[in-house]
Each structure stands twice: as structure tokens, then as C-alpha cells.
Image (cartoon, rainbow, N blue to C red):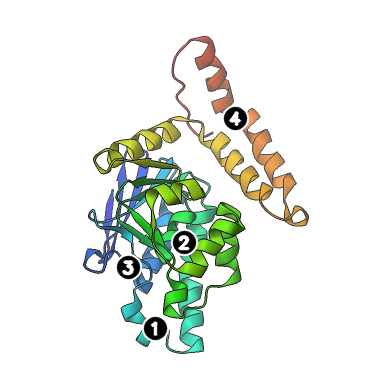
Amino acid sequence: MSKTSQKLIARREGAVGWITLNNPARHNALSLDMYEALGQRVDEFAADSDIRTIIVTGAGDRAFASGADISEFEQKRASAEAIAHYDKISDAACLKLEHCEKPTIAMIRGYCIGGGMDLASRCDFRIAAADSTFGVPAARLGLGYGFVDVKRLVDLLGPAAAKEILYTGRRFTTTEAFYMGFLTRVVPAEGLAAAVNELAETLAANAPMTIRAMKRCIAEAIKDPAARDIAACRRLVEACFASEDYVEGRQAFMEKRKPAFKGR
């Protein structure tokens, strides 16, 4: 399967759905139409039972995403109403990625700046080439950075690292981003594709209902206790034990073979 829009490309390779930010002339800066397309593609992959893992990456080797496309701001973020419209669409797309029940991987090379870091943070895994660069330059641009976005960074990295990133607005190396806790793994640029594909294949081969239950449990665990939906977690766990995949997993273990999970 291959679906193409002007600035975002979606394709399927086996059990893996690929979403490529395709605006290399602007270092894959995120435009409003890219956010709209992103939400649509995530919905499509989420609904496709044959897709087990989703990878988000940037076209070329210079950038994952260099942030929002500031060239649009004069037209599309010049008033309170326009900002609200822009934020509604971009937030909806990012939330779809963040709450997707399937495991997601950000494959990062080059610039991962501002909205690029935010987008990558919505994925379950972030694997970066060693020559990548990170940062949130809002303080250098006079942009507002809202509570939800700040809290996500604090939840992921802790307050000290979040303060350094947000207050200074400076750029960080992959080594710094890794030790702050933003990156899952750093690999040489020439090994990035292999590392991401290996992880995607591992995830795709595992029991999708189990991963779905684990992802929901983790999401609930980081919420305030009063907001947690423990019953939903319990239902998903019980569904695992009642599934054909649970039978297949036990049989494969006893027969010393790889299981063939079907997600049911």
C-alpha cells in the first residue's frame, strides 16, 4: 500500500506502516496540511488489523522535523482565532499518534526541533542517528508553550531536564538527549534503518493484544490516580487470556517454535 500527499507519504511494508514527513526543502517543517494528513494516516493504520507497528520518520537525511513551518504563521497563526484553529488540528493529529493502540517508533536523523521533538515524544520509541540535533527554541522566538506540552516533557524527562531544554532554547546532541531520557537508543547513521527495522519486526511478531493491554496500562499509570481507568486495563488483560493468541503462545512455547499471533 502506498498513499502520497504533497508533504506526507504513507506506505505499508508487511506488518509495518510507514509515515514519512516529506517537506525536505524546509527540513521537514510541519505545515498545517501535514498535521491533517498525519491524523488521517494514523487512523488508517490503526484500523488496519494487518499493521502491527507504525514508524514515523522524515524524508532525506537532514531532518526528522525542524518544527512548525513558521512561514505559515503570518497567514495561519496571526490571530487568536487562527491560532486556535491551527492548534486544534495539530493537537488532534499528535494525540491520535500518542494514543494509537499499536506500538509506534520515531526514526530520527538530523534536526528534531520544536514541534519535531513534540511529535517524536508521542511515539513509544525514539531511535536516533548519532548526527541528530534536538531542541525547543520557543524562548528564542517568543512563542507560547502551553501547559500540556510542558507537562509532557516534564513527565518524560523530569523537571530539571525540561527546564534546561525550555529555558535555554539551545540545541542538544544525541548524547545529551539520550542521557536526559528523551531517546530510546542512539546508533550510527549508517545503522539507523537496520536498528529501526529490527525493533519493528520484533514488535510486529509479538502478541498485539498483549502489547495493546500493556500500552493502555502504562498510559493509565502515568495519569493522576483519580483519572485512571483501571477497569479498562482489566478488560484488556482479561481479553488476552481469553484469546486465540494465548493458546498459540502456550503451544508455541511447548513446541519450541515461534508463535504466529493473529491478534484475536
Find residue 70 and report its image quarter: bottom left
Pointer 1 or 3: first along the chain = 3
The answer to whether residue 109 is left or right of residue 234 is: left
Residue 233, relative to residue 114: is it above or below?
above
Pointer 1 or 2: first along the chain = 1
Residue at image location 62% in from the left, 32% down from the top: 240
Q: Position of residue 2 (x, y in %)?
A: 26, 51
- Nearest to the eye among marks 1 and 4: give it: 1
Q: Which mark is residue 76?
A: 1
- Identity, as a three-letter code, of the amino acid under mark 1: Lys
Distance CA(mark 4)–CA(mark 3): 43 Å
Residue under numbered circle 3 = 29
Pointer 1 or 4: first along the chain = 1
- Identity, as a three-letter code, of the amino acid under mark 3: Ala
Pointer 4 or 2: first along the chain = 2
Query: Nearest the camera: 62 or 45?
Result: 62
Q: Secondary structure at mark 1?
A: helix
Residue under numbered circle 2 = 118
Q: Secondary structure at mark 2?
A: helix
